[in-house]
Amino acid sequence: MKIVMKFGGTSVATGERIRHVANLVADNVNKGYSVAVVVSALDGVTDELGEAAELAKKGNETSVRTFKQKILKKHLTAASKAIENARARKEVEQIIEKTADELEKVLTGISYVGELTPKSRDYVLSFGERLSAPLVWGALRDMKLESQWFTGKEAGIVTDSNFGEASPLMNVTVHQLKERIAPLLEKKVIPVVTGYIAATQDGVVTTIGRGGSDYTATILGVALAADEVWIWTDVDGIMTADPKIIPSAKMLPELSYQEAAEMAIFGAKAMHPRALEPIIKEKIPVRIRNVFHAENPGTLITDVQSTKSTDVVKAVALIRDVAMVNVSGAGMVGAPGSYAKVFEVLGKNGINIMMISTAISEANISMVIRRSLVGRALSTLEIALVGGGLVSEVTAEDDVSVVAVMGANMKGTLGVASRIFTAVARKGINIRMIAQGSSELNISFVVKEKDGENVVKAIHDEFKLGRT
């Protein structure tokens, strides 16, 4: 078996956990597996780097020195817990100290010019993984395992220059990964690659945005022709619902790629849809596994499921922190491009639309957006559209939640929507908005926030998702 293992921030949050990660890798190497490792930054470090960059932009040099000491202490402490061999630990400490010095220089430069560009922000954010990868590498060497660590740039991951959300150039990336990383596996050397970060063809550091480390893992899986990609996280797998809402929620043993993509979009601890793209094409299976319960096989995401599921609905999710914006006006009826103008106004102001529902009358359109953006959405839509004869009113409801019901077997199954909405109606709860895509993999609808958890429980019970 050839496995790519990705470890997220919670998996490498402390020195003790990093040592645990090294033990997991060693166990699988001892089983005869060839293993490549992808690591995220230590838990919370990427956010801390972003905040430090923002403070530096304001010219706060004192904060730069303070942050450098804080980040250095955090990683040196982790090294002392993760690596027992003094010589190996000293080598890792020197790398960490050198990297922290470079980070201080970058932040100081930002404080001098008082400007934080997307390019310089990506460079700052790259330090999280650049500090964590040597720790994992050192812990593996401490266990007498041959290993070599790389930044995404050094490994050969090449992207466009869309800083903050860069897209890998797959042909050149796969070629370079095959050239630089594949030979190591043949020599029984464990490559440790930083997730999330890459570089342009000119060698400028980039980050690949949301789901970045997972994306790195799946790209590496394709390049190495891996048998499976294992995403190690802090949950047993993908659940039928949030266990905080429904304690009886069960782990789903298998999911299709399409189901996993839907669940990730709606906040389940699955892979970001971008990260699924490379492996869908090559049909490489992925496992979501719990780093703290390694005996659990987790959720397998694959093209063809080994057991034919009879479950119509697989899972139900609750999406909080959203708002519903309603745009109405008789002027929109029969006016080509009226909806396009609404979307253009929101798009130009950096507001993403999560869900849309329109009336056949064409007189109104309802959209779900992030709650934090509702003020900006209302003001920009009113300024741009109200009073021009097209739109007469723009309103919002910020006390709502979205419930998403998902499952591949929903497609073509009669009466699914009826069962969902009947279950909601029995609870005396009103539905504010409904949307269903042509894929029929999910039905999403809006309810008042106070009713959200009750709706999830009602649907979970209706489809008996809690049964073993």
Image: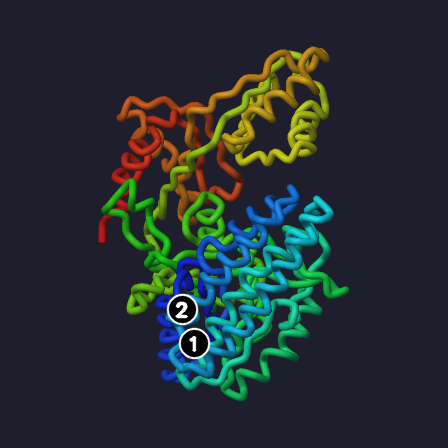
Nearer-the-camera pick, 455 or 281? 455
**Res. 129 mark:** none
Name which of mark 1 and mark 2 comes first in the sequence.
2
How far from the left and from the top, in percent, is residue 308? 36, 58
Using residue 446 as the reference point, say whether residue 64 is left or right of it.
Answer: right
Q: How is the image coloured?
A: rainbow
Give the amino acid type for the residue marked by disc 1 in the picture.
Answer: Ala
**Element at label 1:** helix
Residue 15 vertical placement versus 435 (above, below): below
Q: Are marks 1 and 2 in contact (CB under 8 Å)?
A: yes
Q: Mark 2 Cα within 10 Å, few/some/many (few <14, many 20+)?
A: many
Foreground residue, 283 or 449? 449
Question: Residue 180: x, y in percent?
Answer: 63, 79
Q: Is residue 232 visible?
A: no
Image point (59%, 44%), residue name: 55
Residue at figure coordinates x 48%, y 55% from the top left: 271
Q: In this orientation, which residue lies closer to the viewer: 4 or 316?
A: 4
The numbered disc on residue 139 is 1
Residue 388 seen anywhere in this rendered image of the structure: yes
Q: Is 303 placed above or below 426 here? A: below
- Image quarter of residue 390: top right
Residue where numbered disc 2 is placed: 18
Going by the numbered disc 2, the residue's amino acid type is: Ile
